[in-house]
Amino acid sequence: MPKLTLPVLALFDFDGTITTREMLPGFLHYAVPKWRLRFWKPWMLPLVAAARAGWLSGSTLRAVLAWVAFRGMLETEYEAKAAAFARDVLPGVLRPDMMQRIAEHKARGDRVVVVSGAYDVYLKHWCATHGLDLIASTLEVRAGRLTGRYAGAQNVNAEKARRVREQYELVGYAEVHAHGDTPEDEGLLALAQRRFYRGRQVA
């Protein structure tokens, strides 16, 4: 009998790995009302600068941004903006080399999963278009409006690895590959036998 070849589990971060840049700023400008952006921008700029300098964690900054940007927004409006963002913006920021790697995995029958700290609200549309699984962050909704809080933990750092293990039986795959581009992907990369950081394989 022919030897059974198990598929590879291929894990890809999204922002900066599949895309050419961080997509949260783009989604905020696309989805959030202009008046709200103008009002909060002066207050947010010092926090952004602090995060870039390493004085404020990325998780804290993202939590604040979600609260000021989306608190009180109708869920229907949020969903509509996200679908349009996935359709109109994301195709223009994809890295051809990463899309080629994804295509090669799919052609071999591997399972490909996007594991991202970004919002699932727009990534679910993009992943459905490309036939990919998704693990991402979710914003909380109550009574048809966003609360401005995350529903559960942000999907970054150790949470990425925890949720992958929760949803996939790693020993059931011939090999695990993981792709990332920031220290927040270290937990994801630690799951894999073949690790790729900013496009290059690492030990």
Image (tube, helix red, strand yellow):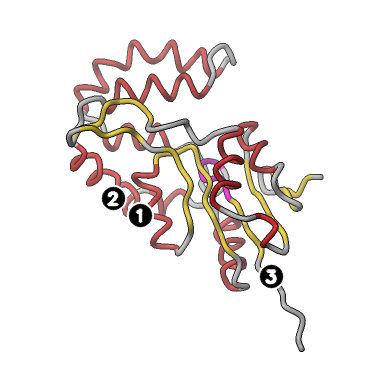
Number of numbered discs: 3
In terms of secondary structure, where does tag 3 sit?
loop
Start and end of the magenta stretch?
12-16
Cα separation, mark 2 vs mark 3, equals: 34 Å
Quadrant hosting residue 64: top left
Q: Quadrant of the C terminus?
A: top right
The residue identified by callout 1 is 125
Q: Which mark is residue 185?
A: none
Left or right: 37 in relation to 107: left
Q: Are marks 1 and 2 in contact (CB under 8 Å)?
A: yes
Q: Is residue 179 left or right of residue 74?
A: right
Q: Work out which quarter of the rendered image holds the N terminus and state it.
A: bottom right
Q: Sequence order check: which comes first, mark 3 or mark 1? A: 3
The mark that comes first in sequence, 1 or 2, is 2
Q: Residue at x 67, y 62 (%)?
A: 172
From the viewer's side, name the closer residue of 63 and 41. 63
Mark 2, residues whose alpha carbon is within 10 Å: few (<14), some, or many (≥20)? some
- The front one of 171 and 159 is 171
Identify which amino acid the numbered label 2 is placed on.
Ala
Residue type at tag 3: Leu
Q: Nearer the viewer, residue 132 or 53?
A: 132
Q: Tell me the chief SS of the magenta region.
A: loop
Q: Which mark is residue 83?
A: 2
Q: CA distance from mark 1 to mark 2?
A: 6 Å
Which amino acid, by three-letter code, is at mark 1? His
The residues bearing labels 3 and 1 have C-alpha atoms spaced at a distance of: 28 Å
Instruction: Give percent across and percent down for residue 57.
Output: 54, 19
Q: Residue 38's spot in the image, x, y percent?
A: 25, 19
Front label number (2 vs 3): 3
Label placed on residue 6 = 3
